Image (cartoon, rainbow, N blue to C red):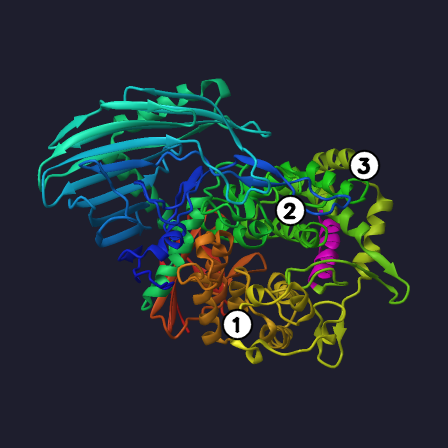
Amino acid sequence: MNKEYIVPNEWAIIEEGFDKENVKSSESLFSIGNGAMGQRANFEESYSGPSFQGSYIAGVYYPDKTRVGWWKNGYPEYFAKVLNAPNWIGIGVSVNDEVLDLNTCKEVKGFRRELNMKEGWYKRSFTATLNNGITVAVSSLRFLSLDIDEVGAIKYSVSPLNADAEIVFTPFLDNGITNEDSNWDDKFWEVTGVISEANQAFIEAHTLKTKFKVCTFMQSEISYKGKTNINPVKDEVKELSAEQNFSQKVALGESVSLIKYGGYCVSRNHPGTELIKAAKSVLEKASSLGFDALLEMQIKAWQNIWEMSDIQIKGDVKAQQGIRFNIFHLNQTYLGTDSTLNIGPKGFTVEKYGGSTYWDTEAYCIPFYMATKDQVVARNLLQYRYNHLEKAIENAEKLGFENGAALYPMVTMNGEECHNEWEITFEEIHRNGAIAFAIYNYYRFTGDYTYIPEMGLEVLIGIARFWEQRATFSKDKGKFVILGVTGPNEYENNVNNNWYTNYLAKWCLNYTLEQLDKVKEGYKEDYDRIIGHTSLRKTETDAWKEPANNLYFPYSQDLGIYLQQDGFLDKELITVEDLDPKQRPINQKWSWDRILRSPYIKQADTLQGFYLFEDHFSLEDLEKHFDFYEPFTVHESSLSPCVHSIQAAKLGRMEQAYRFYLRTSRLDLDDYNKEVEEGLHITSMAGTWMSIVEGFGGMRMRDDKLSFTPRIPNQWDSYSFKVNFRSRIIKISISANESRFTYQGTSDMTIRVNGNRVLLKPSEETIVKH
């Protein structure tokens, strides 16, 4: 099986040649979405070979009861997962009564598929010889509309090449779907109605337990020699599916096309009793525009997205393809229009991780959305957490915390914790700190302080209350300690005094105290409302200062570094370089016991703290910690290479930074972890953007101004990106000898480049020599 089979191309993901072993991987890589729904790149026609059928609707989930052999107090009752939704893309195809199936065809030639990232469509073409001897040329093009986000469109064309043939298209809807990751093989969907009328069909169903109502719909027509036929010759309604047959005798060398519109109307957006009416309205809108006009709208919508979010790299096609692939999928997954939605680690590409929200959003994704879109998008992501504050308080109460202490979930769909591994659920509490940091990060970049008095301060108070209660005083150390945690390095569980966690706790307590004073001084009405609602008293805030001012941090005097946690130096410190390559990846080769006793680090942990709080430490501090911890890091988390790339660039180690960048940007394209068939790593894709903008571009906030320290890998001729800084657009173009800044604004602004003040004037290009 060839895992590096994607053709290098600046604007497209291309596969040439049909290899059955690559089908499931390509279903992930060629996935499409529009923020409201998404689907794996399954074939429209029948395919009897190994495949992972997957269609997903944003925000529609099921609480799958937790499956464990034992139970602990506070354990989540369920694991929430985005459901495999009814399949609307299906188009059965037969040629002279022979089913088209690439798994059983005599021969497949000229197979090619392309995900056009510039224009937002997915196309497949091939020539197949069926077992009845007929050879046909087939092409299909499909997209999920950004403008009408409840609908997608498919144009499927067949041309007989060696004889006249009768082509029968059977477009269908199928609600007989399951989740491969079901804990108990539960039934997730209840079908309440299947209707087929004229050239349209509808399936009404609702999810069990959560009661989301969904209408899956389709409308089809065929076109032959310039004439359109909307009348199926036959239709069939079953308990879980609906199908329609369109038949056409096609002359040798001619082509017949089926155009199919399909999608979902959901009770999240419409009254549950009017979903078919809503679906008919969507179909009317889409079909009256027509396939070509919808596609043209799609191209323009993506043009607008790329105008702001594109990163251009000259001289390195694979690097260029990698960053655009990442940016493309980030925009397919989340467009920021709905504060009730968030970003799952796998997006719309598979069921793994349940499509739920992790701390990845705050730590990795918010910087991308802040800089490439209107600040409202990032604000919606923060509002998502505010909306779940009461649930976060309930989560903490289940673990024995009191008085409004909030523990945000590690995994969630509705604010409730639903992760079903105890060492994560109970112990990976650093997620609380990432949420608080995101509030700080949003304000320092956008300058929009209003979120904090309106919503953010209440979140910070809940988090501060948690940290104060979670820390305990050690008489032995004479300091506060935080015991029994898991840091970002999940290859260490149930450790004491994880440095990153402790540092976040100290920072969160101090930052909350600062914001209380600031809101009290400048937003009196909000302050009084918040104090009244939270019943916060001075005696409580005074108590916060004790752990904030006296928290313990494990440290090695001999090495001059903070230790990842107590006892880290007790391990057998064999670096990754000296590890037998046959033992890699250790998460697939070693027992969990062996991993836990090893010094190997899944992803940045102590170094994650040096990334978030780099202003707190000197360059020499970073270098010392980087040189100690990176050699023990196996980078078996998708979130790891990007942080290390940024830090290597800051240290001026560009070859190392470039290698980390290439790994994070092509993690899925080149299938580094040998698991791409299980879906893409969507949230880490934002880290890829950070690797360029913050790593190579050196973008930071300094004294309330943008600052850049431009660097460029030797492999590149130049690169450029744009940032939206407080509604002012700046394009930064960097080569080996100079940086160019083009500024769109109404008044002069100043930035810093390599520590020097630079004045930018509206609509002018400013050149800074290196």
Up the image or down, 134 lies above or below 22; here it is: above
The amino acid sitting under disc 1 is Ala
Asked if the residue under mark 3 is in contact with the one under mark 2, i.e. CB atoms within 8 Å, the reply is no
| Picture disc at residue 535 | 3
Residue nearest the viewer, comparing 297 with 151? 151
At 31% from the left and 59% from the top, the residue drawn is 10
Residues under labels 2 and 3: Cα distance? Answer: 31 Å
Query: Magenta part mainly helix, strand or loop?
Result: helix
Asked if the residue under mark 3 is in contact with the one under mark 1, i.e. CB atoms within 8 Å, the reply is no
Among numbered discs 2 and 3, the one appearing first in the sequence:
2
Question: Is residue 407 left or right of 327 when viewed as pictured?
Answer: right
| Picture disc at residue 648 | 1
The amino acid sitting under disc 2 is His
Mark 1 vs mark 3: in front: 1
Image position, residue 190 (x, y; %) = 51, 26
Magenta stretch holds residue 511: yes
Image position, residue 736 (x, y; %) = 38, 73
Identify residue for label 2.
419
Magenta stretch holds residue 138: no
Picture quarter with the N terminus = bottom left
User: Is residue 450 at all visible to an observer of this figure?
Assistant: no
Crowd rating for badge 2 (residues with CA inside 10 Å; few <14, some 14–19, many 20+): many
The amino acid sitting under disc 3 is Ser
